[in-house]
Amino acid sequence: MSSSKEVIRARKKLFNTLCERAFSHLSGEESMTVSLVSEKTLYARLNHSKIRQSTNVDQSEVEIQFVSNSRELKKSMTLTWDEGEDFKRLQLLIESARKEAEILPETPFIVDPENNASSDQDILLERSNNEEVIDQIFKPIQGIDLAGLYTDGWVIRANQNNKGQKHWFSTESFYLDYSIYSEKQKAVKSCYAGTTWNQKDWEANVNDSNHQLSQMRLPVQDVKRGEYRTYLAPAAVAEILDTLNWGGWSGSAYKQGWSPLKDLIEGKRKFSDKVTITEDFTQGFSPKFNHQGEVAVDTLTVVEKGELKNLIVNSKTAKEYGDLKSTAAGGSEGLRSLKFHTGGLAKADILSSLGTGLYVSNLHYLNYSDRPKGRMTGMTRFACFWVENGEIKGPIKDLRFDETIYNVFGDNLLEITDFSEVQPETMSYGCRHIGGARVPGLLVDKFAYTL
Amino acid sequence: MKVNARKSLESLNSKADWTGIRFVEEDSRTLFVRDERLEPSHQEINSGAMVEVLVDGQFSYAATPDTSELGLKRAYQKAMGLAEIAKSWKLTNFTEEQRPKATGSYSTPKANDLDTAGIEQLVQNLVDATKAMKTSDEVMSRHAYIMHSQTKMRYVSSSGSDFEQNFTQNLSNLSVTAQRGGDVQTRSNGMDVGQAGAEFFNREKLLKQGTQIGEQVLELLSAENCPSETMDVILAPSQLYLQIHESIGHPLEIDRILGDERNYAGWSFVNLEDFGKLQYGSSLLNVTFDPTLPFEMASYMYDDTGARADKQYIIKDGQLLRGLGSLESQSRAKIDGVACARATSWNRPPLDRMANLNIEPGTSSLKEMISSVERGILMDTNKSWSIDDYRNKFQFGCEYAQLIENGEITKTVKNPNYRGMCTPFWNSLKGVGNNETFEVWGSYFCGKAEPNQTIRVGHATPYCLFSDVEVFGGAK
């Protein structure tokens, strides 16, 4: 059986060959970028501390961004890693793009491929059989009601263009995203992630969760709708930031009228001067290059002391609007490596600073209830507690909140924790996603619960 | 994808108790016109196979893009290796009964394929639709977006299954955003979806919708904010389809009730004991799982395990009868279900998914329902949705609403929202529209499961009237 390093080396070689062959068939005025998304992943879905479904996935897709005759088209196809078959398919794809470029209207604001820079990064381990971990997962969770997903494998992101620009990024990691449940269906959420499985760390992680679950066995507190002083733990803050990433920082979204941060961008509203947010690629969550191979700066300040400093902008948007500067963003102009800067609230002081109110570990299913005004709604989830005079009284029944971001990050923000936690990207729609964020907890006054 | 499916299966010489291969090839196109100009068009051709093995009561899966005999053999070995390890920790014992023999074929009824000439014409139609939205200088952006997917699925198994299904599914989304002062409003067609050929993208319909939303977005800029009070609500199908999806569909998925989804999308307030007993809604509520409506998004002959799909009442006269559960879930829960094991594509295993989940028409005309309301609101076109992980406390926002006073529509209001609890809400149903108010809607992008999957679903419904709903407007 081949190790991941060997397989990835072979794929790098074949991707280079495919690109070279494809570029050599372009005519003089044609240009093209070829992007690769590839993974080999073991997914084990768990329920009641048993395996519900287990799947090995080997999948790869290339996308061509073809430019000819002032037209730009994107086409993508599955790679089989058989050079003959893949090149045949790629040729057909390019040929169909060429034909459609003849009949479609001109594309506005095309950004022609350039050779800006190249990069090559492999963060890999010598592992050949990730299935061996499965047995180890179950040893410490017997007698516990656990549901979740074990994900293990490697991913590749790469692109090349016919001007000579080449980027390659591969990484190998695992995570066990899970929750454990009490007899009364109260739950605690956690995630054990890393590059090498360590049984002692896993057992410690489960023990921590079990300890938290014991607090969920306290009497359930009946909390009526209203405004409460609230501590939002890092995972809850990350949900709010995820929702804001849906057009909040995007230059294009702002120009087209659907940014939830319109008033912040226009300087009509401010966040608290405690809030500083950066896009920080030195955290290593994702590659610095975007879908066109453009490379972002290591660190970009987005919000500094409550004021917006930079929008997230790709080169197409920059070309269209003129007054926005490209930050080498991706197609959706979201933050790919967010860092919310810490404050001064120590972990040991969270409950005493909260005093009386709600301790919210997680939020769920957020959406805008008034997008242009930055108002969003969502639910509390997992380990959320009613706290009185700095003492946990017991878990709550889930509550719905409805609040504007200007209250949460602005007028009502009391304190930010002096620590932050990594929130690894665990989405796998279509393929295993990469990325993450580093986020602290927030103490907020008058957080509005509506149902 | 040119494969000899049966020969590929035989060449595995499988040692498993049961073996299946599901081949999927999908060709999807997206066209996006913004402000009368075509953005880069996109075509995705995605293909591969999922090899499934049943070993000692446990299904294990391996997905591969390589559908050659060698590629499938490698995937088979991966699945067998995984089954060997997983069987010590299996949740339940399955048998071949969860993979019944299925033969035959299904194809979307359609008149036209989307060829190159059709694409050229469609682009022009989308350009013209955005042109029709330009009703004022206050309009900031105009979008016309379509997706057109052709999916071929072939399934063979060691128990003799051999069937093929060919789906052609479509989405059309038109939207316009306008600004006046600090107020920004967006109006859309709510995302039309359905099974059909290229005829789905009818030029006259696109232009009519473009004109209408262009006029209504200006109407919204001039409108008052939605009042905050408890009142009667009439929901148009363009909103009600998502209410059905979130507060009837998901809570009735048996795998959710069994806890499979607890770590991600959540659990359900419904218990297995509720089937046959729970008064889910008022006696006017009749909900069916109906894979037989030819143009609805999720009409099919078999699910992805080979279970034959037919129309079933899920809720009858308000009473909960059966769940949305596959043969696997039915064997675990010991309650009735439907043929709903579906996978997003070749790279994911099947699980309980909604397909077409509809409210059956009633007897009221829309005019009669409006006339019966002393003070209420008619809400149209979903804009925002959120619900808790047990599928109980929901909140929805709509794009457009009209106040009803003394049995008549009096004025348009903006930023309408409402919230409530699942079964009290459905039990407040006091009017169900007749066939003339019945519309077919659905979604291209229902997310669920770990690893994540999206699935395409259909929801057809008439207009419905609910009493005593908590309604509110936008931020001050």
Image (cartoon, coloured by chain):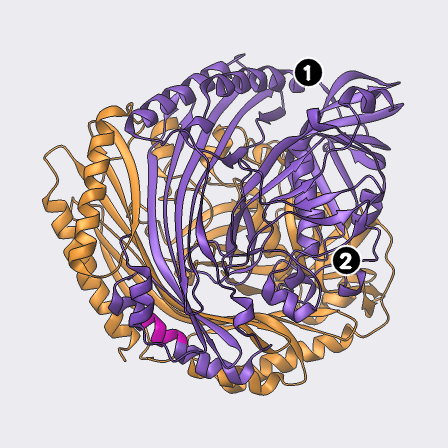
Chain colours: A orange, B purple
Q: Is residue B16 visible?
A: yes
Q: Position of residue A377 (x, y in %)?
A: 69, 45
Residue A233 at x, y = what percent? 66, 62
Contact flag, marks 2 and 1 (Cβ < 8 Å) = no
Secondary structure under the numbered disc 2 in the rendered image: loop
Residue A95 vertical position relative to residue B71 in the rendered view, above or below: above
The residue wearing badge 1 is B222
Span of residues in magenta: B74-79
Measured from the top left, where is residue A139 in percent x and y? 57, 87
Answer above or below: position of B456 versus B135. Answer: below
Q: Any magenta on residue B472?
A: no
Magenta stretch, overall SS: helix
Q: Amino acid at mark 2?
A: Asp
Residue occupying the point 56% across, 83% down: A138
Say whether residue A370 is visible. no
Q: Chain of mark 1?
A: B
Q: Chain of mark 2?
A: A
Location of mark 2 (residue): A398
The amino acid on which the numbered mark 1 sits, given as a three-letter code, is: Ser
**How many numbered tags mark residues here?**
2
Question: Does A288 sit left or right of A29 as displayed?
Answer: right
Whether discs 2 and 1 lie on one chain: the answer is no
Task: Specify the farthest residue to the top.
Answer: B136
User: How many angstroms separate mark 2 from mark 1 (CA)?
Assistant: 37 Å
At horizontal 47% and vertical 39% (from top left) the residue drawn is: A250
As displayed, is residue B84 above or below residue A218? below
